[in-house]
Amino acid sequence: MEQVKNPHPEEDPISVLPRVGPKVASTLEKLNIFQVKDLLFHFPYRFQDKTRITPINSLVDREFALVVGRITSVEENFRRSRTRQSYRPSRSLTVKIRDDAGSMKMVLFHFSNQQKYYLERASWIKCFGEVRLMGRSLQMTHPEYSVYEYSPTIPQADRLTPVYGLTEGIGQGMMRNIVLSALEYCKNLTVPNLLPKAVIRANGLSDMELAFDDIHTPKIDDHQEGQDYSSLPAMRRLIFEELVSFQVARRQQKKIRQAADAPNMNPEGDLSKQLRDSLKFTPTKSQRTVIREIITDLRSASPMLRLVQGDVGSGKTLVAAAAAAWVVDSGHQVAIMAPTELLADQHLKSFYDWFSPLGIDVQVLTGRLTQKVRKQVERGMKTGQANIVIGTHALFQEGVEFKSLGLVIVDEQHRFGVGQRFALREKGVMDKQVPHQLVMTATPIPRTLAMGFYADLDVSNITELPPGRIPIKTEIFASDHRANAIQRVDAVCASGQQAYWVCPLIDKSEVLDVESAVEAEKFVRQSLPGRRIALIHGRIKSDKRDKIMTRFRKGEIDVLVATTVIEVGVDVPNASLMVIESSERLGLAQLHQLRGRVGRGATQALCTLLYKQPLSDMSRSRLQVMQETTDGFKIAEKDLELRGAGELLGTRQTGAQIFRIAEITRDRSLLGDVIKAADLILEQHPELIDPLIRRWTIREGQYSAV
Ligand code: ADP
Ligand code: MG
């Protein structure tokens, strides 16, 4: 029987492909991949050039390269570390590699005995990875590698190797193979163009038919030495298209929001006045301006979506409280979402102190409430008894309902995934009513990016700190000078103040992270026998963590040794010293957040940044930025210059990916033209809007919130 030709193989379910069984299929669904077509549109966000071997003496710090050489030695090293819970030596493997031009090291921290066995017996190695210059020696940590008995022949591949966004359970190699089989399955399929001719022409984009093969595995000769992959003609057109899609989606979203009804607000009521009168300080001019901007939005007919940017310590909580008071006065409820339980608790304290004397019901909903208490809180939310509910992501779980949600406040928005924020807003959608939304962040979007691009978002800036704050001093030491830091801590404690000692996430594994904090606590304890020292990290149960935080707040603890759990929002004005170990490993935004935990009182605060040697030039520049300024906006701009927006906007590493292939830092010069293209499409090509958004959306609702 002759087989009928399938006219649309791309619409078949992915299960038709080899290697895609039910388990892999359900894993791919997490990336919204259901049909073969979805794999074709799962574009690589970067490429590796494995077509050329780089001689060791031509390697460049922080660049990826393929190296082939002889193994000259394999050495296992042990580092003993004793913790309270366990006694566990951690080991690493150093492999020395030499080619005609020079030598380098390959280092593995996680390896099996079998891996070691093969490395010891092999004579040749081929490895591909990121090169780092450590002091004077070149090193690759955990590269992809294979070993050989004889000098390996290198297959002359003429195409670049794609790197894909992944989800747990599917590795890079597997994803490559699956996409390759999808390409094979729909041979010679091309990507339909969704940009108007005029846009293609005006922006000098490639107007060639794009073949999927050329996108997933571009030919090397399309690519010139030293050129950024994003400037491959096919990639450039797709990046442009993705940015246009994002812009169009946000503008659509704004239209939808503006067409929706907002909860009704009254003129200023008693509660707002009472709150103002009960304050122990005078709001700054900047706080007052921002509050006014918010109230104006609240009183308009369509739902607000406003971002409040204000440096750490600028007093965003009060702004949130003023907005909440207005909404409660008008008979609606307020939900406040914080990224951590620690922060939710702290907000609870502030809001409770401000509002409960005024007869307002303030509740907290986090993951750790007992079933019984939780049910009670949920009942209060549903009946409207609870006026203000503070919580973590538990706030928008299944089954949580509000009687009349008027305002959603999201604190430190960069810590949430976009999907999570959206889910919370949905909760308020009843009879077409959309609650107002206020988003607060201390990690500002640099002006260069914010302008125009976040088109649907109104922005308020708190531009001054409360009076009397003395700018924090920052000093930088190599970790060999830990003793200096200890002296600082001792002096601070002697004057009746408190200190933080932070060990950031050093390893991907939480175990090691906790271990290093445990070690640091021992070190601090031994060095400062008379002081009261406590340790706090993610593995400590939350009720115990609370107790420690409360004691620290009350001044019953002198030094709090912590992982970055204390990063956001924690407010203890008597703490005036922040020591950060391995500070070179942290992003500038994160360092700024951490440093912002001090300098909240009336005394001179100090931040001591310790780093592990050797320090690369890049890391040095970054730490110097911290020394030069305490202005969060400036730091954000510098961060953008030095490293890229991924970190800044909290996207890739938190799993809340906004773009498939575009990268807002790298591609920022396109933004102006992208906005023009979006205008044109919205005005003259409405038929393109839906296909554009559908092609590029990663998850349902992904473009809809901040
Ligand atoms: P952030 O913007 O980092 O969230 P907070 O809202 O936690 O800052 O405020 C930091 C500290 O400053 C808090 O202790 C708060 O009570 C205090 N504060 C806020 N506004 C003022 C003000 N206008 N005058 C004096 N202190 C203020
Ligand atoms: Mg805050």
Image (cartoon, rainbow, N blue to C red):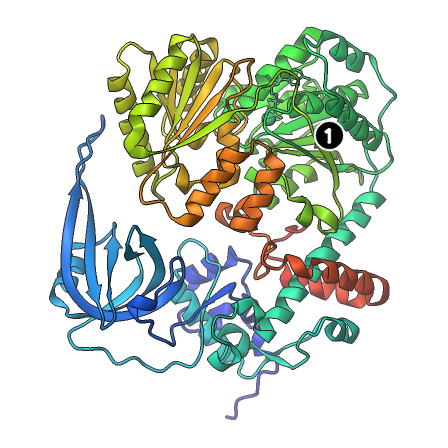
The picture quadrant for ligand 2 comes to top right
Q: Is residue 518 rendered to the left or right of residue 281?
A: left
Residue at horizontal 25 percent and vertical 54 percent from the top = 107
**At which x and y percent is residue 85?**
23, 28
Residue 376 shows in the view: no
**At which x and y percent is residue 319?**
71, 24
Which image quarter holds the C terminus? top right
Residue at horizontal 77 percent and vertical 38 percent from the top = 434
Residue at horizontal 78 percent and vertical 13 percent from the top = 271
**At which x and y percent is residue 696?**
63, 61
Q: Nearer the viewer, residue 403 or 298?
A: 298
Q: Badge 1: few (under 14), some or many (20 or more) residues near its Cα, within 10 Å?
A: many
Q: Secondary structure at mark 1?
A: strand
**At which x and y percent is residue 245?**
70, 60
Residue at the extreme bottom: 2
Q: Nearer the viewer, residue 437 or 512?
A: 512
Q: Nearer the viewer, residue 298 or 640?
A: 640
Residue 15 to residue 563: above or below: below
Q: How many marks?
A: 1
Q: Amino acid at mark 1?
A: Leu
Residue 476 quadrant? top left
Q: Is residue 266 rendered to the left or right of residue 512?
A: right
Residue 67 to residue 250: above or below: below
Mark 1 — residue? 407
Residue 631 shows in the view: yes
Q: Nearer the viewer, residue 171 or 603?
A: 603
Q: Establish whether ligand 2 lies closer than 8 Å to the Cβ of label 1.
A: no
